[in-house]
Image: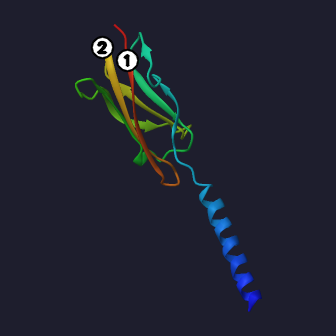
Amino acid sequence: MNNRILAAAFAATLLSATLLSATGAFAHAYPQTELPAKGSTIKTAPAALWIEFDDELEPKFTGVKVTDAMGMVMSEGPATVSATDSHHLSIALKPLPPGQYTVTWHATDTDTHKTHGVYSFTVAP
């Protein structure tokens, strides 16, 4: 009887270790680089914004929006994931006058894990 209990305990331990290592293999897409960068103050307003993620993105479920201090949307058209680099998300911007802008992004990686975030940057006068 002790051998059965020992075998069951060993099997449970092995199963737990397998499940823990399998879940560690799944990643989530988080920004690694932004342009304009998070918290930056820039002198020249960009024509586009881009974010480089640490995981491949699912284009249909990934996006970004840029708003001004009054909440007006300053991004144009849909955000796009690059056809040659599935880590790269970009969006065209309307002309940005000096002020603070908020970037709101959401991403779904190819494993269907969802992430989202907000950051800001400033265009100096």
- How far apart are the two marked residues, 1 and 2, measured between alpha carbons? 10 Å
In the image, which disc is placed on residue 9? Answer: none
Taking depth in this image into account, of 18 and 49 the one nearest to the observer is 18
Residue ID at (45%, 25%): 38
The mark that comes first in sequence, 1 or 2, is 2
Q: Residue furthest front?
A: 2
Residue ID at (48%, 54%): 112
Taking depth in this image into account, of 14 and 88 the one nearest to the observer is 14
* Coloration mode: rainbow
Q: Quadrant of residue 16?
A: bottom right
Q: Picture coordinates of residue 14 (x, y %)?
A: 70, 71
Q: Picture coordinates of residue 62 (x, y %)?
A: 42, 43
Give amino acid for label 2.
Pro
Residue ID at (23%, 27%): 72
Q: Picture coordinates of residue 122 (x, y %)?
A: 37, 17
Q: Secondary structure at mark 2?
A: loop
Between marks 1 and 2 in the image, the one whose residue lies nearer the viewer? 1
Taking depth in this image into account, of 109 and 11 the one nearest to the observer is 11
Q: Quadrant of the N terminus?
A: bottom right
Residue linked to disc 1: 122
- Residue 61 shown left or right of residue 67 in the figure: right
Give amino acid for label 1.
Thr
Q: Quadrant of the C terminus?
A: top left
In the image, which disc is placed on residue 97? Answer: 2
